[in-house]
Amino acid sequence: TLSNLLVANATLTPGFSPSRTDYVLHLPDRRSSVAITPVATSSRARVALDSVEVKSGAAVMLDLSPERSSVVFEVRSPDDQRRSTRWQ
């Protein structure tokens, strides 16, 4: 699971909670990208953003075009259990 999901220059609603899986991302006007830092609970877990592996604890710049309706983070534990977090 994710222990934290940090979002720079935008607002995640509701605020992050490890037990929650669905959020809405609110961007300021004229903003088309956002820096996101996913943090996995386990240092051995793998984190993917829209199926592309990213490093837990490292910021990722995400371009948000009007055509993009959602973003999915998936965390996979060492024993292959998976949990997804999604925002629109």
Image (tube, rainbow, N blue to C red):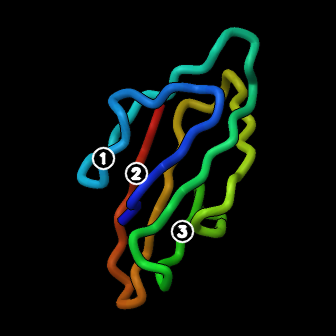
* Number of numbered discs visible in the structure rendering: 3
Task: Identify whether 10 is placed above or below 35.
Answer: above
Q: Residues within 10 Å of mark 2 (few under 14, many from 20)?
A: some
Q: Which mark is residue 85?
A: 2
Q: Which x, y percent locates residue 65?
A: 72, 27
In this view, the residue in front, 34 or 68, is 34
| Amino acid identity at mark 2 | Thr
Residue drawn at 67 percent across, 61 percent down: 58
Residue drawn at 60 percent across, 52 percent down: 37
Which of the 4 image quarters holds residue 42?
A: bottom left
Q: Which x, y percent locates residue 32?
A: 75, 24
Task: Identify whether 72 is placed above or below 24.
Answer: below
| Amino acid identity at mark 3 | Val
| Amino acid identity at mark 1 | Ser
Residue drawn at 45 percent across, 37 percent down: 87
Q: Nearer the viewer, mark 1 or mark 3?
A: 1
Which of the 4 image quarters holds residue 35?
A: top right
Q: Earlier in the sequence, mark 1 or mark 2?
A: 1
Q: Which mark is residue 47?
A: 3
Label 3 to label 2: alpha-carbon separation = 11 Å
What residue does disc 1 label? Answer: 17
Task: Identify whether 22 is placed above or below 30.
Answer: below
Q: Earlier in the sequence, mark 3 or mark 2?
A: 3
Q: Earlier in the sequence, mark 1 or mark 3?
A: 1
Which of the 4 image quarters holds residue 30?
A: top right
